[in-house]
Amino acid sequence: MSALDLIATASNDEFAGRVMMIMFKVAQAVATEDPATADHAERMSYAEMVIRGDEKPKLVSAHVISSNPTISGAIESHPGAYGSNVPDSDIEFDRAVLDLDGAVAGVCAMRKLAPHIIDALRSQPLALALVVINLLFLTGFAFMLREIAQAVARKDALLAEIASHCIR
C-alpha cells in the first residue's frame, strides 16, 4: 500500500502503453463526434494533442491511478504486476479522465468565472494590490531559491575539485 508501488506502475512502459492506446481510442472518438457536441472545440484540441503524440501517457497513467480507487486498489493488491491485473475495461471506464470531460468543464467554468474575478479586482484596488504584491514576493522567493541552488552546486563542485587534489 505504498505510493511507490503506484508510481512504479504509472512509470511502467507496458501500463503506460495500454493507457496510451485507450487515449488514442478516445481521441479518435472525439475526432469523429458531431461538432455540435458540447465543448467539442476544447475536446478536439485535446484529441489533436493526443494524436500528435504531445500528451504524456505516463502522466495520464498517474492521473488514472490516482483518481480511480478500483485501479489503485488492484495495483496495491499485487504491486509486482505493475497494473497487468487491471482490466482495460476499468481503464476505459475512467474515460472521464482520459477525454478530460472534467477538465474541459473546468476550463469552460474558468472562462466564465475569469471576467467576474477581473471585475471584482478592478472594483477592489486593495485586493488587486495584495495579489500583485504576493505574486512579486513569490517570484522573488523562487528567484532566490534558484540562486541558492546554483551557489550550492558551485560550492559542491569546488569542494569536489579540492578533494580530488587532496586525494592525489
Image: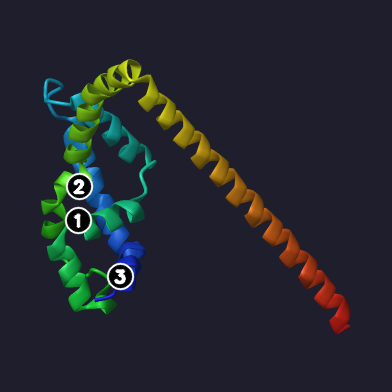
Label 1 crowd (10 A; few <14 / some 14-19 / many >=20): few
Q: What's the residue type where badge 2 is placed?
A: Val
Q: Secondary structure at mark 1?
A: helix
Q: Nearer the viewer, residue 104 or 89?
A: 104
Residue most extreme to the bottom: 167
Tag 2 secondary structure: helix
User: Going 29% across and 68% down the picture, which residue do you hit?
Assistant: 6
Indicate the quadrant containing the C terminus: top left, top right, bottom left or bottom right. Answer: bottom right
Q: Residues within 10 Å of mark 2 (few under 14, many from 20)?
A: some
Q: CB under 8 Å between callouts 2 and 1? A: yes
- Residue 67 numbered tag: 1
Quadrant of the drawing holding the N terminus: bottom left
Considering only order in the chain, which callout, 1 or 3, is on the residue closer to the N terminus? 3
* Residue identifier under label 3: 3
Foreground label between 3 and 2: 3
**Position of 32 compared to 151: left or right?**
left
The span from disc 3 to disc 1 (Cα, nearest Å) is 13 Å
Where is residue 23 drawn, in percent x and y?
24, 46
Q: Residue furthest front?
A: 126
Circle 3: element type? helix
Q: Residues within 10 Å of mark 3 (few under 14, many from 20)?
A: few
Q: Is residue 41 visible?
A: no
- What residue did someone put label 2 on? 97
The answer for how far apart the CA atoms under marks 2 and 1 are is 8 Å
Q: Position of residue 20 (x, y in %)?
A: 29, 51
Q: Is residue 36 left or right of residue 9?
A: left
Relative to 160, does residue 91 appear above or below in the rendering? Answer: above
Label located before the other in sequence (3 or 2): 3
Res 126 → quadrant: top left
Give the mark toward the camera: 2 or 1: 1
Residue at 34% over, 72% down: 4
Task: Look at label 3 and name its amino acid.
Answer: Ala
